[in-house]
Amino acid sequence: MYKYTNEKEIIEALERQAFLFEQQIVLGKVKVKDIEEMLPHTVTLGIHDLDNIRPTYYSKRLFELYAVTREMFGEDPFLAAKKVTFPGDFDKSARLLAAHLTSDRKQLPISFVQRLKVSDDQDFEGIFTVTNRIQHSPELVSIGFKLSELGIVGNKMNRLFEETLYVRENYQKFTQLTTREIEIITLLALGYQNNEIADQLFISKATVEQHRKNLKKKLEIKRFVDLIRFAQAFDLI
């Protein structure tokens, strides 16, 4: 298994891991509670409703690791979060997440850092969070842990699900795709012709043809079978 040695590699790997978690959940191969049991004990896992970002599931580790009680969280999770978060960090992260979920990159994970109290008598500590939207579901999955443990947690988590060399080498290409390009890749891989895609997406055939040329260059592919492989690896079909 490849060992990640610098912060940039670790963050990219964790975002890919969040993407793989989401794939496993969507495909029904693993349940949220099963993932939590696999994670290092210093990592928290949460599921949030996409419409109002309210938590629908949160690991009990949250109450063991941070200065928040189950009672506080049960009464008002937003207020509880603000009480243990450095002033301004909660609102800043909320705005960042809201902007991401309405952007052309909403299918990708997003990561950010907040400062949280780990206990009442200690200073705030940086918490790294990776959040990803669950496809075909009105929910988000979030993974959080202390920034000081970034390297340790990063390498432990990336042993949970096998990450193929193909995904690792092509993930950055996937992150550069627009929502429209993903729609076209999906329809192409499903066997639709240019005119059929144009009709479905309410664009011209010439526009579809231009997208195909751009995709060949962006994904560095020459054969149609390579497009299908890419679509399958990133769960587009």
Image: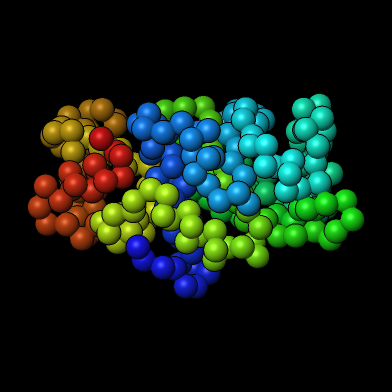
Q: Is residue 115 left or right of residue 17?
A: right
Viewer-closest of 56 and 32? 32
What quarter of the picture does the C terminus occupy? top left
Colouring chosen for the image of the structure: rainbow
- Residue occupying image coordinates x 63% and y 52%: 42
Position of residue 6 measured from the top left corner of the image (x, y, whole percent): 49, 73
Q: Is residue 30 left or right of residue 140?
A: left
Viewer-closest of 209 and 67? 67
Q: Is residue 154 visible?
A: yes
What residue occupies the far right of the structure in this picture? 121
Viewer-closest of 57 and 94? 57
Q: How many marks?
A: 0
What residue occupies the far bottom of the structure in this picture? 6
Viewer-closest of 18 and 32? 32
Q: Is the residue 158 above or below the residue 140 in the image?
A: below
Q: Is the residue 166 above or below the residue 9 in the image?
A: above
Q: Is residue 173 visible?
A: no
- Residue occupying image coordinates x 67% and y 42%: 61
Q: Is residue 230 left or right of residue 176?
A: left
Quarter of image, res 52: top right
Position of residue 71 measured from the top left corner of the image (x, y, whole percent): 82, 30
What quarter of the picture does the N terminus occupy? bottom left
Position of residue 124 measured from the top left corner of the image (x, y, whole percent): 80, 58
Quarter of image, res 201: top left
Q: Is residue 157 left or right of residue 56?
A: left
- Residue occupying image coordinates x 78% and y 33%: 70
Q: Is the residue 201 above or below the residue 150 in the image?
A: above
- Residue occupying image coordinates x 18% and y 38%: 189
